[in-house]
Image (cartoon, helix red, strand yellow):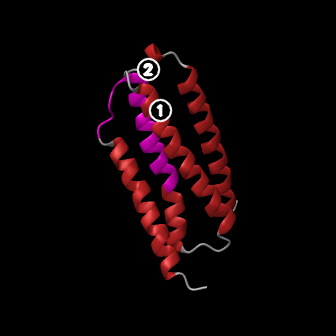
Amino acid sequence: MTIARMWCTTAAFMAAMAVVMGAVAAHLPIERFGLPEGREIVHEAVQMQMWHALALLALGMGLRAPSRLQILAGCMMLPGAMLFCGALYVTAFSGHHLGSVAPTGGSLLILSWVLLGVGFLVRHD
């Protein structure tokens, strides 16, 4: 499987799960959340997850010969999104914060975007 196909496949499943989580958040009674602001926390996680699913899809469809930096950037988006969004989902539904999990995931996401930008900047087509 090529990296582009892997990114597109991953993006499709990430987007599907974002829609599922959005539906859960919209229809779940407020008392089922671990925090009063749980619905809003899930909403933020869903948005972040969907944006990064779309970014991975765009990378998979648009980069025929990605550079090493671009490959690294794309490959960092999935664990970054999983850590960041997963920590938000856990917090929203359980009320328990997972320490530095969300910041670590967020940092991976930020770094992936920086690497992607540098990859485009130094690319020699």
Callout 2 amino acid: Phe
Considering only vertical position in the picture, is 16 above or below 68?
A: above
Instruction: Give percent across and percent down for residue 55.
Output: 58, 57
Pointer 2 local density, CA inside 10 Å: few below 14, some 14–19, many at least 20:
many
| CB atoms of marks 1 and 2 within 8 Å | yes
Residue plotted at (35% across, 24% down): 95
Considering only vertical position in the picture, is 11 above or below 112?
A: above
- In the rendered image, which residue does mark 2 sit on? 33
- In the rendered image, which residue does mark 1 sit on? 42
Question: Residue 17 sits in which quadrant?
Answer: top right
Q: Which residues are magenta?
A: 77-99
Among the two numbered marks 1 and 2 on one chain, the one whose residue lies closer to the N terminus = 2
Considering only vertical position in the picture, is 7 above or below 29?
A: below
Quadrant that contains the N terminus: bottom right
Main secondary structure type of the part rendered in magenta = helix
Residue 79 falls inside the magenta stretch: yes
Considering only vertical position in the picture, is 58 above or below 40?
A: below
